[in-house]
Image (cartoon, rainbow, N blue to C red):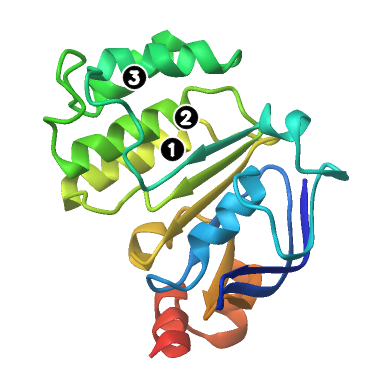
């Protein structure tokens, strides 16, 4: 579904990512793992078409990232990008105006199920609640590739289970999900593949079960070993 070759991105004199080469298959859930500042967000934005790589290529279904790919790629950023005047319900309508594949009824069901009030102003809710709104907006599109940037960040332990259950609802044999996080234990049991990014480079890419078997360790322990 997605093929990245020698991706590099430089912001002024800072290298945000370098030599990122990997392939993602349909029907799988990937954990994009690494500490803060490792390049996870830059990678996701390059795939979403929001950042142009300095070098390298990104191909979605064999074609360069562009208008066609954006119709099938749903990206959840870490930033709060809704306008201050908006309620949670307005945020859904905003998405509905932009994306033909957005299902407003699904959005309402998701936010309510995650304990968010549709009438609350987006500027008045907590960081965790705002993350739930962004997640619901991203998952309410009928996309083929979901890029979820730190969906568990700022979320309490009980709410994380609800969020993971919400994410798994969109999982399908023709859908790819990429979840970035540094909370490895939360993703260990649900992901099929892992991508470790360190200092802007992918230092480990592979099937989660294969890595556990080869190394005789959990993904969380491999993470600690890699980034210690």
Q: Do the residues labelled 1 and 3 touch (CB within 8 Å)?
A: no
Q: Find residue 16 and name its label.
A: none
Mark toward the start of the polypeptide (1 vs 3) = 3
Q: How crowded is mark 3: few (under 14 residues within 10 Å), some or many (20 or more)?
A: many
Which residue is more in the foreground, 28 or 2?
2
Image x and y of residue 206, in percent: 66, 70
On screen, residue 117 versus residue 103, left or right, reads left
Which residue is more in the foreground, 189 or 99?
99
- Circle 2 sits on which residue? 139
Q: Which residue is drawn at 13% across and 39% down?
A: 126
Q: How far apart are the two marked residues, 1 and 2, measured between alpha carbons?
A: 7 Å
Q: Find residue 91 and name its label.
A: 3
Image x and y of residue 165, in percent: 37, 37
Residue mark closest to the camera, 3 vs 2: 3
Looking at the picture, does residue 37 appear above or below residue 1?
below
Looking at the picture, does residue 171 appear above or below residue 87?
below
Q: Farthest residue in the right direction? A: 62
Q: Residues within 10 Å of mark 2 (few under 14, many from 20)?
A: many
Q: Residue at x 77, y 29 (%)?
A: 68
Where disc 2 sits, the SS reads: helix
Residue mark closest to the camera, 1 vs 2: 2
Quadrant containing the C terminus is bottom left
Looking at the picture, does residue 122 appear above or below residue 58?
above
Where disc 3 sits, the SS reads: helix
Q: Do the residues labelled 3 and 2 touch (CB within 8 Å)?
A: no
Q: Find residue 167 and name its label.
A: 1
Q: Do the residues labelled 1 and 2 touch (CB within 8 Å)?
A: yes
Where disc 1 sits, the SS reads: helix
Image x and y of residue 173, in percent: 68, 36
């Amino acid at each position: 579904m997605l093929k990245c070759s020698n991706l590099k991105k430089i912001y002024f004199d800072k290298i945000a990512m370098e030599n990122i080469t990997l392939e993602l298959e349909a029907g799988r859930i990937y954990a994009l793992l690494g500490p803060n500042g490792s390049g996870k967000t830059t990678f996701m934005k390059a795939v979403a078409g929001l950042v142009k790589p300095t070098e390298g290529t990104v191909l979605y279904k064999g074609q360069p990232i562009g208008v066609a790919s954006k119709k099938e790629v749903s990206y959840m950023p870490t930033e709060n990008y809704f306008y201050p005047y908006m309620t949670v319900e307005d945020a859904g309508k905003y998405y509905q105006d932009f994306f033909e594949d957005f299902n407003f009824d699904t959005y309402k069901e998701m936010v309510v199920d995650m304990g968010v009030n549709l009438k609350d102003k987006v500027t008045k809710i907590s960081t965790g609640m705002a993350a739930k709104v962004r997640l619901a907006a991203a998952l309410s599109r009928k996309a083929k590739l979901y890029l979820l940037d730190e969906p568990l960040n700022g979320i309490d332990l009980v709410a994380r289970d609800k969020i993971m259950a919400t994410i798994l609802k969109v999982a399908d044999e023709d859908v790819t999900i990429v979840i970035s996080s540094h909370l490895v234990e939360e993703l260990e049991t649900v992901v099929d593949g892992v991508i470790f990014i360190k200092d802007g480079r992918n230092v480990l890419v592979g099937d989660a079960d294969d890595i556990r078997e080869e190394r005789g360790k959990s993904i969380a322990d491999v993470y600690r070993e890699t980034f210690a």
